[in-house]
Image (spheres, rainbow, N blue to C red):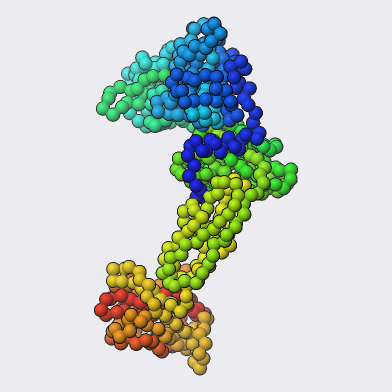
Amino acid sequence: MLIKPFFSRTTQFTLLLFIHSLVLATPANDVMSTATTIDNLPFSIQQMTVDATSDEVKPFCSSNSGRSVWYQYTPNSDQMLNIDTFGSNYDTVLSIFTEQSGSLNEVFCNDDFKEQIQSQLQVELTENTTYYLVVNGYQSVTGNLSLNMQQIQIMTNDNLSDAIVIDSLPFSLSQNTQEATGETKEASGSCAPSSASVWYQYIPLQDEKVVLSTLGSDYRTVLSVWTGSNFPLQEVACAENQESRQSQVNLNMTAGTTYNISIEGMVPIGDFFGEQGNLVLSANAPPENNDLADALEISSLPYTHTQFTNGSSMEPNEDFASCSQNGATVWFKYIPDSDLNVSFSSIGSTFDTILTVSQGDSSHPLTEIACNDDAVTNEDQENGSQLSMPVKAGEVYYISLGGLFDETGSLLLFVEEIEYDLVITQQPQGKTIEPGSVVTLTVNATGIAPLSYQWYQGMREDANMPVGTNSKTFKTPQTQATTNYWVRITNATGSINSDNAFLFVDAKQNSTGVTPLGNTIVPKADFNGKVMLPGQTNSMTQVSEADTIAVKFEVTVDSEHVGQTADLVMFVDYENEGMTSRFMRESNTWFLWNGEFGDLSIAQENVSLQDSLSDISIFEGELAGYPGKFDVYLGYRLQNSGNIIYNRLPLSFIVE
């Protein structure tokens, strides 16, 4: 996951405006005179308002709004309606006007329904009166608008026997549940305390997956599904959501089975009765591109697509994304006509998206080639994802958009060709340092803002060890061993990797230390070890079980320790067939060691520390029966402080 600079919510929409301004025209319903006519209910539409310009009216409930789109509706009878902008990805203001003597008269207005940034109105409209619905953006923000409008029905389905029959999908109905009650022997949904039910019934004609949702309701609902013809029924699913007031059930239904759908109100803590209000129930099939086999084809660029992903799910054998925990995926397919650089973006979606690009033979599992979550800020509240990458002519790319932890909502996908614009003007510089040093590395680059930075430890292109914050500078931790850092810089056109910045730890000071409390210290000592065969002085890295070897050290003592008395300690890590054992030396015998420095035995007592100690013998003889890798350490424990000073880099050799 790339760590990126913080953008405010308004800035995200400004970025969205920039992305789309080249390819979207002013909406057809930008002004009142060209308002979209609503002929039938229920009515639902999604449209992009990015290039809306109209500021014809200022709603009384929010004078700080602008850039509107218009709709008009003339009811053929007196009606009670529910109108909302739920599913939009920006802060909306919803108002309704009538026209009298050539001037507009505002009759209804709402901003931020029940602390949400979307709007909702429940209104009584008069027969044969033309009403103008206006959707403004708060502070003139724009984005992907979802407008929903349906008639509120009189409640007739209080009892199971009077359940409203859902004849076919899709289905949507709004009703007021103020008079809802429970029945004798009726059980409430098991997922939350609830009461006061209304009932619906659906009998599928074929095996199918059905998505039931109460999105748009103005109270906290509990949605449960039951089989059977009379009480007691058998519960097969239950869902609730206290925060969003939306309950959703995704259920595989069997042909010919009667499914009874109950919607109750959440019972507040300390109360006895469930909440009631305006209920919106919808029943739908999953999205058409829910499965890889039904991926929507991206035919040409630039490409913009909006959809609701409610009801989407993962398929058998479908892999999770590598960059985050995704679920509820929908699929797209892209075959470019030529080699080019492409940007895939879901910035502007209403839920936390995870974007992947994969290749394969049109069936799961695919091979993921790129993945992104939290494109701009890497903040928890960010929804959008973005990937920029080169694509090859004629190759097939599968694009997956999933929700973090199965979230769903209003999805915006924008795909465009881009020009690569990213150059590093100053590479991070390596240097030689003393053990324990802290180094600040710096990189500078030019390109289309915003630029994001992710530092890594390890060799260039190795992204297994991300470190640091989203900054062009990185302050390393205390460095005890020679290591390497590099940085990946990203913007909307792609990514670029810096050169390696090697930090060489001075080998003349091969030492580290630990206090009795376990704290690390950085002494100025040097340990030089050798593994030698008889008659040789060169150090060996590989010997045989039959060889007689001598393992010896020379020590340059830290000047602050010269003249003190210390005890020598010796310990070895031995690895064979993936198993590691630790040994310590006590006098001339080796024992297993638990790795605790406080339990480390003494190999040689009361050593007077001079400037240097030479010819210290660790081991002499054969290692028959011990094939494997040995990492050897020598140290001295200061008697006055208990601090142990030992070689930071082990003397390593292999026995075959």
Residue 130 is situated, as x and y percent measured from the top left of the image, at: 55, 9
Residue at the extreme bottom of the image, as rendered: 535
The residue that appears at 60% across and 56% down in the rendered structure is 424
The residue that appears at 61% across and 15% down in the rendered structure is 33
Instruction: Judge from the rendering whether residue 374 lies leftward or rightward of residue 416; answer left or right.
Output: left
The residue that appears at 46% across and 13% down in the rendered structure is 107
Examine the rendering and report whether any part of residue 27 can be seen: yes
Residue 506 is situated, as x and y percent measured from the top left of the image, at: 47, 75
The residue that appears at 41% across and 69% down in the rendered structure is 436
Q: In front: 186, or 294?
A: 294
Quadrant of the rendered image containing residue 25? top right
Examine the rendering and report whether any part of residue 567 can be seen: no
Numbered-mark total: 0
Residue 431 is situated, as x and y percent measured from the top left of the image, at: 51, 69
Q: In front: 309, or 450?
A: 450
Instruction: Judge from the rendering whether residue 514 lies leftward or rightward of residue 111; answer left or right.
Output: left
Q: In front: 578, or 105?
A: 105
Instruction: Judge from the rendering whether residue 191 lies leftward or rightward of residue 452; answer left or right.
Output: left
623 versus 140 height, above or below? below
Residue 369 is situated, as x and y percent measured from the top left of the image, at: 61, 50
